[in-house]
Each structure stands twice: as structure tokens, then as C-alpha cells.
Amino acid sequence: MSECRSPQKTGVASSSRSSIGNILKILQSIFSLMKQPADTLPPPLLFLGAKMRPGLSARDMAARVISRFSESDAVNGEIFQEGNNVMTALMVTVMEEIVNAIQTEAKVSTIIDPGAITINASGANAGGPVTVVGTNINIPATTGVIQ
Amino acid sequence: MSIVKQKEDIFGNIAALRTLTDDFPKLSINNSFPSINNQGNSQDFLMDLIFSLVGFEEIRELLIDVLTYASEEAESVIKESLKVELKSLVACGVDPSLPSWMTSNGITVPVSNVDFFNILKTNPESQAGGLLYEDVAATINSSDLNTFLYYTIQDQSIPHSWNSILDFTFTQNGTPNNTLTIIPYSGYNNLTDLNNDFIDSVTLFPSGQLITNIIDSLFGTISFNLSVNKTEKQLETEAQIESVLQCILDANEDEVVDDSFFSFSNPQLRAIKEEARNRKQGIRQLKTCSTVDVNMPIDILTDFREQLSAATTYNEQRVVIANVINTMANHTATFAGQPTDEISVKLDFIGLMFKSIMRAFVNAVLGPKIVTIFLINYKIVYGQNATYDDPIDFMKKNVQLIREITDNIRDMIIEILLQKVLKYITALISRNYVEAQKERGNAQLAILLSLVGVPQEVIRMIRSNIPISY
């Protein structure tokens, strides 16, 4: 069939159900479904467990990724060439850079929800101003964002 | 954002969703699909999406479904559009009662003004005629208007009544010669009643005729047959009609169909001539590594129509239609030359069939069944002596009707395709959502275990028994 007289169409969605603008709008809306927020970790567990974490290690991470190369049929070890395997060397570099960026450049901004901290305070009344010294008695969860 | 960018985004989103699902075919998704462009053809885009989501087999099944079930809906959609459009013609200050010259003398027009596709020149009892006409055995009492008109033309100067709605008389001699005189049946005074009754009395898409029309427009199977033997000039006119219809089908809603839609550029004329030449030879050129000339034997269509007439239920009809589509696809594949090209030739054939459906539906409106009643309305609205030069001029003067019908048919076909696309994308998203939920649960478990001091190796062992993907 011969070409149409006017091949260029505008991107404006028309009122027709079958116009390309309308169809693109319908299809794009499907892909923009809201994701659910991540579950909050129990604060007492975090309070105890976080202190036991060993911290990030680029070498450990790279080693684990390299050990799983076979799962995706990636070549592991220097089989076909002399010297280091390019993929493993690259993986170590990638992990080092990721860990370095997190350790030296990332910033965690946190907020504490209003009313999250309950304090227990004590002081003495000597007829003047009372200075109260207190401590929070619960373990409040805070919300943070990595930047 | 440009249309092409939006289309690319959708293909990209599908590719991203499929990274975690394994049960969809591993087809490459990239912008090599021909529909990823700035053009507004919704059908091609949705077909490419379906192809990328589920592949060739599903496109074929969808084609079979549309050919089996959509004719009935298209018939009611088009008839409704016709009634609305004809009513709007007389609503603008025109007296809806039939003028006296119409009820007494009727209109006399050359047969060629009613029969743009030269259907009435073919004998219904020939092999090709068997594919163009219905209810041939009943001759003048046929329930098919085309058959009725053919036998009216054989019975010169004798008036014959079509369902007591219109009387037709053929006159061979005179100036002009080969004319039909059409007079409303006595008792009809109101134009709207005449229009509605006439439209209800005809069947636009008799079973199977849609497929034979599509195959003829693609391969010239019927036109090439000796009993029809259309001239190259006639085939050029038909190619021009199809070209105009395709441009209107591809036009956006906000695009005005002006006179330029009915004129042709030099490249268009070259393509029209080439298409007419190929149909005259009964071939179509399909592209593989090289260009191959493919024909479609008329016997395949004749066998199909015989089997279809024996099928009584929709399920039986579907089986017959599926068989003929497979037979024709396999036949075209024999021209591929290389075994590796067979699938692409089959795919090309299925795609061509699909792309021709909308045109074939609208084309039916330009047959004698509908042009007859439009001609009567045209003469009443624009005057007894009003006339048109050729089919293109007819379309131009009835552009509102053509636009209305193309919009409705396009909406109908696009809705079917869109439903399929949404079904497959929803399935993909659901599958992906389940995988994402499993990943979230798995990650939460790992974090909790790490916080209570479970060693990394043990956590890994536990996680490996609850894999993210199956």
C-alpha cells in the first residue's frame, strides 16, 4: 500500500478511544503503579543487632559476586587467556567504588517523629528554677534517607 | 514527549518487567519494530506490542478470533453509523418526505455508478462468482442484494422488487446505456423510513466474504481469475480507494480530512500502479532476503467457502477459519526459498491480513448494497441531476460518512487489540509484583536474622532455599 499523504502526527491525545495519544496514555498509566513502602524493622532488634554488624567490605562483596558467576554463565577464572579474568577484576573495581561511595560520600538524614521520644525526668524544688535531667525510656524508630 | 519516545518507553518498561519472569518468550525488544515511529497508526503499534509480549502464535489466534467474531459487531456498528449519517443528511432543513419525482420516476444511473468494484459483471455461477455472491440458487429471490441485482440485470427492462422497499429495472440501451432505474416501493413517503428499512434488509458481511475480499485485495486471487479478469485500470481505481481509506484510517481524530486525502502524489501513484499490476498478475511481492512473488490459488478460497457453509456454530466456523489461515500461511511460506525465511514470510502474511481487516470492513460500504441507498439520498439532498465522477469523488462528497465509519471500525478493532495487550501486560505486572513481594519478604528476613547475630553464611543458605525467582 502506498504511503499516506501526511505521515507526521501530533502527540496530542484526541477524544477518540483508538487514537495513539489515548492508547499511549492508557499503557503508560499501567506502569506507574505505586510501590509499597518498605517494612519498618523492630526498634529493639535494631538497637541490639546493629551494633554487631561487621560493616561493608568491597573484597567480601566482590568475592561473593564472583562465586556466583556460574549462576549467570559468566566465565570464572582465567580459562581462555593469560592474566586476570577481566570480569573478576572489573567486579572488584565496581564493588570498591560502590563501597567507597557509600562510606565516604553517602549521608544519612534522619528525622524523629513528634512524640516518638518519651522522657523520664527528675529534679528538685528549692524554691527556684528546676533543672530537669532526663533520659528517653523507649527505643523510638526514626526515619532516614540516604543521600 | 514525542510519540516515538513514549512508544520506546513502553517497550522499555516491558523489557524491564520481563527481567524477573521466565515464562514469557525471550524475544528481543528494541526499536527495530517498524511501528516505533512518530506516526499515529495505533493498530501497528499494538500488534508489535502483542508480538513482543507473546509472539507470532498469539497474533494468529487473535486474527482468527477477529475474523470469526468481529463481523457481526462490525455489521451492527456500520449499520448504526449509516442510519445516523443518513438521518443527519436530511436533518439540516431538508424535507424528510420523498419528493414526487422520486416516487414517480425514481432515479436512473449507470450501473458503474453503483458498482465501483465491477462485482455485477461476474457470473454468480462461476468459480469466482461463488466467492462474491451469496444465496445464488435463489437467483432473483436471493437474500443477497448483489445476487438480486445480477439477476435483475439479466432480466432486461423488467422491474424487480427488493423486499418491497425498492424497485430496480435494468435498461441496456439508451443514453447513457446499461442503467438501473431505482424507485421506492409504493407506500414509502418518508426518506428516513426508507433508509432504515433498506439498511436493515441487507447483510454487509456474509460469513467468509471478509476473508475472500481481503485475499483478493492482497493477491488479486479473484480479480485475476478468467471469469472476472478485471482491467488494470479498474484495479488502479480499487488501489486508489484502498489508499484513501488507509490514509483516513491512519489519520488522528484532530486531523481534518481535507481534499488532499483524495489526491495522490507521484510516489503514491507509482505504488498504486505497481499494486494494480501485481493484482492483475495474481501475485503479491513479499520481502525475505530478496523479493518473492507469491500467489494464492482460488481453490483454497473455494474449499474454504464450502467448508464454512457447512459450519453451523461459531466454534465450527472458527476451526474452518483457523484451517484456511494456516493453509494460506503455509502456502506463502513455500515461496520463502530458505527454510529460515519461512517464519518471516508467514508472519508477513498474518500481519498483512490483520492490517487489511479495517480496510476490508470500510470497503464493504462502497459496494452496491450501500452506495444504492446513498445515491438516493444524494440525489434528494443535492438535486435530481447531481452526480459524481468516480468512486474517489463519491468518497470525497460523502467524507463525513467515510470518516464516521472508519472511526467506528478503528475503535472496534483497536479495542480488541488493546484488551489483549492490557491482558498480557497485566499478567506480566502481576507476576512481577509477586516476585517483588517475595524479594521484599526475603530481604526483611535476612535483615532480621543478621540483627540477631545469625552468620552471613547461614543466612545465605536460608535465602537460597527461598529463591527470589523460580
Image (cartoon, rainbow, N blue to C red):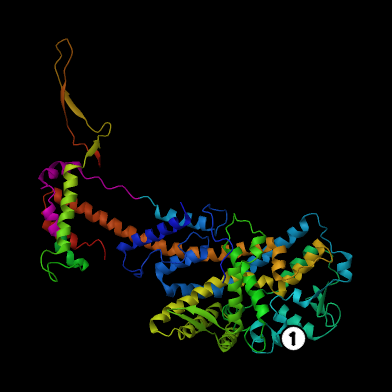
What x and y, as percent, mark residue A132? Answer: 16, 20
Q: Quadrant of residue B175?
A: bottom right
Tally of numbered discs:
1
What x and y, as percent, mark residue B348? Answer: 47, 76
Q: Is A116 in the magenta?
A: no
Q: Is A38 in the magenta?
A: yes
Q: Chain of mark 1?
A: B
What quarter of the picture does the C terminus of chain B occupy? Answer: bottom left
**Horizontal relation, residue B96 to residue A142: left or right:** right
Please give the name of the residue rendered at 60% of the width and 80% of the height, measured from the top-left corner.
Answer: B277
Q: Visible in this render: residue B75?
A: yes
Amino acid type at circle 1 is: Thr
Q: Nearer the viewer, residue B146 or A52?
A: B146
Label 1: element kind:
helix
What x and y, as percent, mark residue B31? Answer: 40, 63
Please give the range of residues in magenta.
Answer: A35-64
Which residue in the structure is indicated by mark 1? B139
